[in-house]
Image (tube, rainbow, N blue to C red):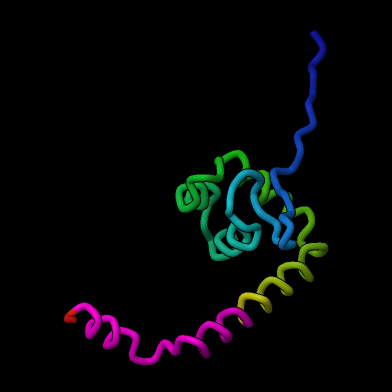
């Protein structure tokens, strides 16, 4: 009997905002890559992001490993966008003294 091989699509989709996510989830490519490069296994990543299946996490890691040079600029751009968002948010809502403000609000 001849083997039948199927080709599977990478489970990644680019949203209207330009962010690459695991298809059908809100899990971003950079989240999976960051966890993987920090030493997490595919199983740990799938546990951390239950909306992404283990099979999809393995495929995303494989895609990253095969295309890391092509993804470098995208990942650097996303890192820059996240840093800018953090700066903007911290300028609007300074994190200094947040614990004290939250405790004071609780006592009211």
The residue at 29%/86% (across/down) is: 101
Q: Which residues are magenta?
A: 84-106
Residue farthest toward the front in the current orientation of the protein: 108
Residue at the image point whose x is 69% and y is 71% from the top: 78
When the figure is inspected, residue 31 is found, relative to residue 43, above or below; the finding is: below
| Image spot of residue 6 (x, y percent) | 78, 26
User: Quarter-wise, where is residue 54 in the image?
Assistant: top right
The stretch drawn in magenta includes residue 88: yes
Residue 62 or 11: which is nearer the viewer?
A: 11
Report the quarter where the C terminus lies.
bottom left
Where residue 36 sits: x, y (%)?
A: 58, 59
Considering every residue shown, the one lying at the far top of the view is 1
Task: Using the rendered view, name the quadrant where residue 15 is placed.
Answer: bottom right
Give the residue drawn at x 25%, y 81%: 105
Rendering quarter of residue 27:
bottom right
Vertical order, 54 against 88 (above or below): above
Examine the rendered structure and indicate whether residue 108 appears above or below residue 32.
Answer: below
Q: Main secondary structure of the magenta part?
A: helix
Q: Is residue 75 above or below residue 10?
A: below
Q: Is residue 90 magenta?
A: yes
Q: Quadrant of the N terminus?
A: top right
Q: Camera-side residue: 44 or 82?
A: 82
| Left or right: residue 108 compared with residue 94 | left
Q: Give x and y (percent) for residue 94.
A: 44, 89
Q: How many marks?
A: 0
Identify the residue at horizontal 21%, vertical 78% (top origin). 106
Judge from the rendering whether residue 105 lies leftward or rightward of residue 19; answer left or right. left
């Amino acid at each position: 009997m001849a083997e039948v091989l199927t080709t599977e699509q990478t489970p990644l989709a680019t949203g209207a905002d330009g962010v690459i996510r695991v298809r059908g989830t809100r899990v971003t490519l950079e989240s999976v890559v960051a966890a993987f490069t920090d030493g997490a296994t595919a199983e740990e990543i799938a546990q951390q992001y239950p909306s992404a299946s283990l099979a999809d996490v393995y495929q995303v890691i494989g895609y990253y490993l095969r295309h890391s040079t092509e993804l470098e600029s995208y990942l650097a751009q996303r890192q820059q966008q996240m840093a800018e968002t953090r700066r903007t948010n911290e300028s609007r809502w300074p994190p200094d003294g947040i614990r004290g403000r939250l405790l004071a609000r609780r006592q009211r």
